[in-house]
Image (cartoon, grey):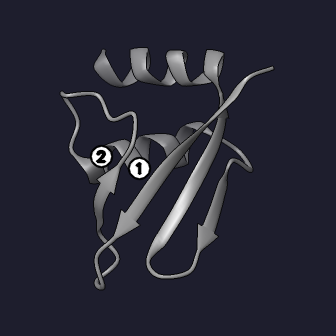
Amino acid sequence: MEKIMIHVRFAPNGTVTEIGERPASASAQQWFNHLSRGTTNCYESLSGGRGVFRIAREEMDALKAACAA
């Protein structure tokens, strides 16, 4: 199963400023919230206001479709 990595950057106040694989219809914060609610044990916090989701490609496609709906 192929997994992709989605990188996240946070502002000092905790809001999301950048996130990968984001659909055009969603803001960075909305996409982060959608991924956080739609996945389990896929997110890893990193230092320096960063984090990463590791998600299977098939699951990512389904999450994008659900976000667009």
In the picture as drawn, the residue positioned furthest to the right comes out as 1
Q: Which residue is located at x 29 percent, y 69 percent?
A: 15
Q: Which mark is residue 58?
A: none
Label 2 with label 1: CB-CB less than 8 Å: yes
Give the quarter of the image for residue 69: top left
* Disc 2 residue type (three-letter): Gln
For the N terminus, the quadrant is top right
> Is 60 situated above or below 62?
below
Label 2: element kind: helix
Name the residue that disc number 2 marks: 30
Q: Position of residue 37 (x, y in %)?
A: 53, 44
Determine whether 59 is above or below 45 in the image. Answer: above
Residue 45: percent from left, percent from top? 61, 69
For this rendering, which residue is in front, 66 or 56?
56
57 left or right, relative to 61: right
Q: Secondary structure at mark 1?
A: helix
The CA span between labels 2 and 1 is: 5 Å
Q: Residue at x 43, y 57 (%)?
A: 8
